[in-house]
Amino acid sequence: MQDLNELLNIDKNLIWHPYSAMSSDLPIYHVDSANGVRLKLSNGQELIDGMSSWWSVIHGYNHPAMNLALEQQLKDMAHVMFGGLTHTPAIRLTEKIIDITPEPLNAVFYSDSGSVAVEVAMKMAIQYWHAKGKTKRQRFISLRSGYHGDTLGAMSVSDPETGIHSLFSGMLPKQIFIEQPQCRFGEPCTDNNIAALKKVLTEHGEHCAALIMEPIVQGAGGMWFYSADYLVKARKLCDEHNLLLIFDEIATGFGRTGKLFACEHADIVPDIMCIGKALTGGYLSLAATLTKQEIYMTIDRGEPGVFMHGPTFMGNPLACRAALTSICLLVESKWQENINRIQQYLEKGLAPCRNSPKVNDVRVLGGIGVVELKELVDMYTIVPKFVEAGVWIRPFGKLIYIMPPYIIDNDDLGTLTSAIVSLINDS
């Protein structure tokens, strides 16, 4: 086996990491194994994972039921093309997804990642209107401070200025953006809060295919929690202006906000919904785009008579088996009680940050805890300090946030929040 330093040198010189320069001096930590909520580094140190590996590993690492399901699936097949063929894992997963998602979402398109799920949703919307003879409906309305992925279409509906994709703005389709909702979660949405959306729909609605938004929680764009009432009013306006509504539930789905899906806080249903991240419990990459019968039947009846998308690894059997197992583990558990417990401990543990002059805001919802600082985080110093404290927390921008696995216990939650409080006080 190669020496660890040699492996890390190969990594540094040959591998790009997310949002990182090849020549970056930002430390990279070599993970030897992972179990439960702990990452074991090659030097023997263990870190409590506060990130759920970017919000996906909700059941923790090395889960015996997940492992067994994949071992069994490997004996049958790891992959088979989905064009002209099907298999039981995809069929059973589809039944389960339709069962747990709001009615009447009753058709599922599988893809490889959240970004692609958003691309698929956008193509669905455009092809739907094309099939209805309204070919001018090509643009999308989106919220500022939103994030929907890193592929071109997804970038075009993410925040064009303050977001992470402004470099590419010149080549992206020009979408229509409105200010993020300022009504916080738990507050009513006033006429003033919804006025920007109403104005845009009146002026540009006939040329737009859909309104796309992250319901309740704007994730990578700023971890902002906004009013469920805004969603209710947005749904009503879309209906009045004959516009499709797309919800990006990739980060919010599968219980993270305290509801199985964030749209349930508002008791409304979008026309198209994207899910991913926690879908497979973090074991394999899989995402899905759901829609209603009227939309897929309209697409089928239009030209060219098929939906124009088809990933090579669409409906991968291993990923579908992982997703089915993960969903069953979730819905058969007392997940709501667990999320409520996590929320209470996050609120209690992060409360001291409110007294710091360095902190602008503290926000907690479900299994999400956010501390918004007044200044940008120095990643080069803060990440090693978190590692030294025995936790894995990866901030961005002005935000220090945690979204731990659902199986985390109270002691480990306390360690995560104490590390955040200590670093803010000591920095």
Image (cartoon, grey):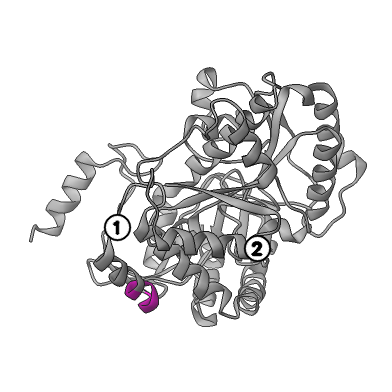
| Residue 59 spot, x, y in % from top left | 46, 72
Amino acid carrying label 1: it is Tyr
Residue that mark 2 sits on? 257
Q: How many numbered markers are drawn?
A: 2
How many other residues sit within 10 Å of disc 1, few (<14), some (14-19) or many (≥20)? Answer: few
> Which residue occupies 82% across, 39% down?
239
Residue 65 painted magenta: yes
Where is residue 47, by image quadrant?
A: bottom left
Please state the extent of the stretch shown in magenta in the rendering: 63-68
Q: Secondary structure at mark 2?
A: loop
Callouts 2 and 1 close, C-beta under 8 Å: no
Q: Which mark is residue 29?
A: 1
Of 79 and 215, the residue lying toward us:
79
Residue 60 drawn above or below residue 184: below
Query: Alpha-carbon neighbours of circle 2 within 10 Å: few (<14), some, or many (≥20)?
Result: many
Q: Spatial distance from mark 2 to mark 1, Cα to Cα?
A: 30 Å
Q: Decide whether residue 187 is among the magenta residues.
A: no
Position of 90 relative to 9 (above/below): below
| Screen quadrant of the N terminus | bottom left
- Residue 128 horizontal/vertical position (percent): 65, 32
